[in-house]
Amino acid sequence: MIQDITPSVKFIGVDDLDLDLFESQYVVPEGMSYNSYLILDEKVAVLDTADGRKGAQWKANLAEGLGGRTPDYLIIHHMEPDHSALIAWMLEQYPSLTLVATAAALKMLPQFFEGIALEGRTLAVKEGDTLSLGTHTLRFSLAPMVHWPEVMVSYDAADKLLFSADAFGRFGAMAKIAFWVSDDDDWACEARRYYFNICGKYGVQVQNLLKKIAGYDIAMICPLHGPILNENLGYHLGLYQTWSSYGVETEGVFVAYASIHGGTAAAAERFADMLREKGCPKVAIADITRDDLAECVEDAFRYGKMVLAASSYDAGVFTPMHDFLYRLQAKGYQKRTVGLIENGSWAPSAGRVMKEMLGAMKEITIVEPLVTIRSRMHAEDLPKLEALAAAILA
């Protein structure tokens, strides 16, 4: 699709409605967008390409956007293949084209495009470097590990646009969601899932980027995935501040359970009811054996408190809970309060393993009591669950 961002800046990105798993792991029922932009000035700049899956459509969008003009520069914000697959084609198609990227990105190019000829066709930019296109001047800021080491963002002072690479991205194809953010809550839902699963480990690096862009007068944020942010930017920047500092976005408790035959599930559901009865402002509950783990990771970070309920399995913990805790550790889960419920018919072991895995994470407070049930929840277990509910809410 072609869309005017401003009179001289166009969106030339493409949708992927056929994709089942983004990065081969995240479900995308609304598809995915691969955003690309075009600045038409005295010099012409293309900002990123797209995924090879949609290369033909992107090339058609580029040709339509150019309207017969020849691009002078290809700005490479991020080398991940969903944004860079057409770089070699661009070099071949436009012999006078110059690639503009960080030194780290230029070093990566031969890894993706064997035999690519780059001599005399690249411009390595550093922190604060600028590139004049005429009326528009792009100022570059390095954003390493947001979420690859070669990433940069660019700011156009003429139209007050921030081209933010993967930052401020969202799951979903433009054909399925609004081109401009029209519903902040809807944006936040999928942007949160995207952030914590894609960038969650790199909160310090995201904080560094937020500090760099704090002095910019930004009218719109143009990410590489999802809609353009052109209103209520304080809200979106504020969420990124909370997320990247591992702050609590929503007061409440997230209850995540992994149950084999239903006994642990029943205990988790009863425990969630106890939290509600005690006035917990928000209780979210998930069956991690069946629910989307990426959404479970999202909720673990969203709330300041979490309770895990899991069956014991092979002298350890039921594997879906192990997988969930592994993901949390990989994404930098920290600064949270956690309660534990274990189930075991003869040798309960889930609590021990959950404690060990949580112990490898930063600033995790595990509240007592650790509640142990045997096969099924019984009347004598209810006081222990009540005590845990009171402790987690204290």
Image: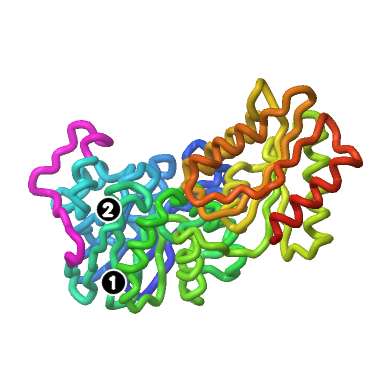
Task: Give residue 167's quadrant in the image.
Answer: bottom left
Residue 242 in sight:
yes
Residue depicted at x 83% and y 40%: 266
Q: Please, which residue is most extreme toward the left here? A: 120
Give the residue at mark 2: 76
* Image position of 90 (left or right of 279): left
The way the protein has been coloured in the rendering is: rainbow
Give the residue at mark 1: 156
Looking at marks 1 and 2 on the same chain, the residue that comes earlier in the sequence is marked by 2
Q: Does residue 379 lie above or below 167 as drawn? A: above
Residue depicted at x 69% and y 61%: 394
* Image position of 284 (left or right of 42): right
Residues drawn in magenta: 109-130
State how far apart marks 1 and 2 are (Cα): 15 Å
Q: Does residue 156 lie above or below 113 as drawn? A: below
Residue 21 in sight:
no
* Image position of 75 (left or right of 95): right
The location of residue 3, given as percent across then percent down, is 43, 66
* Three-letter code for the amino acid on which mark 1 is drawn: Asp
Under tag 2, what secondary structure?
loop
Q: Does residue 110 lie above or below 48 as drawn? A: above
| Residue 114 painted magenta | yes
Under tag 1, what secondary structure?
strand
Which SS does the magenta portion mostly show?
A: loop
**Quadrant assignment for the N terminus:** bottom left
The location of residue 295, given as percent across then percent down, is 61, 48
* Three-letter code for the amino acid on which mark 2 is drawn: Ile
| Residue 25 painted magenta | no
Task: Give residue 209's quadrant in the image.
Answer: bottom left
The location of residue 291, given as percent across then percent down, is 68, 42
